[in-house]
Amino acid sequence: MTRAAVESVEPLEDEWLVIIDPQVIFADPKTSAWGSPMWAETVPRIARLAAAYAGRVVVTRFVADPGLGGSWADYYDDWQFALVPDENPLYAVVPELADLADHVVTQGTFGKWGAQLRSVVGDQARIALAGVATDCCVIATAIPAGDAGASVRVIAQACAGSSVEKHEQALGAMEMFAPQITVI
């Protein structure tokens, strides 16, 4: 499938841009085991999109919540470096995108489609997704949002995966959820 260049993406009426987890912890593989090798090339694309959505930009943040229990306890056994407080520089939004948010949603789960995000955009909103990682937090937000009745557009070139292969696999999986989710 041919996907549109970020420059040609126009906001739909009443559509919100949701920038998933543009944080230091995901920005550089040299800084963090969660860093995306695709992030550096994605940041300017996200900044261009944010300008087009001025007034309707939500930035989400992942912050570890060891109190979630269950499978999260096993997860943090493997990723103990992430068990730092919210104020830790790893959880800061990258400087290039730090001032773009009209709203910020912080959550301790991969998916951000929850009460906090819905309180900003609405239950059956139109949302465009960008951010990191395509194969984790983006897909974990897109599918529940679409399933709940939101119209979701995933801006492929404004997303960064943990690898190019996993990025493409996640985009392919989300394409199967049309028309609730559209990958452009």
Image: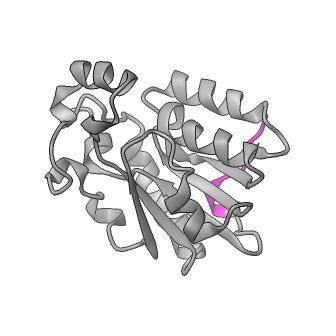
Percent position of residue 77, x then y: 22, 19
Magenta span: helix, strand or loop, mainly? loop
Q: Is residue 150 above or below residue 119?
A: above
- Which stretch appears magenta? 1-7
Can residue 59 be seen by looking at this rendering? yes
Q: How is the image coloured?
A: one colour
Of residue 66 and residue 40, the one placed in the foreground of this image is 66
- For image coordinates 65% across by 42% down, the residue present is 144
Q: Position of residue 149 (x, y in %)?
A: 78, 52
**Relative side of 28 to 10, left or right:** left
Which residue is farthest right?
179
Q: Is residue 128 above or below residue 90?
A: below
Q: Position of residue 4 (x, y in %)?
A: 72, 50
- Residue 184 appears anywhere in the view: no
Q: How many numbered circles are shown?
A: 0
The quadrant of the rendering that contains the N terminus is: top right
Residue lying at 70% horizontally and 28% vertically, measured from the top left: 172
In the figure, 170 relative to 115: above or below?
Answer: above
Quarter occupied by residue 122: bottom right
**In percent of the image, x 67 and y 48: which residue is there?**
145
Can residue 145 be found in the magenta stretch? no
In the image, residue 2 lies in the stretch drawn in magenta: yes
Residue 161, percent across and down?
47, 34
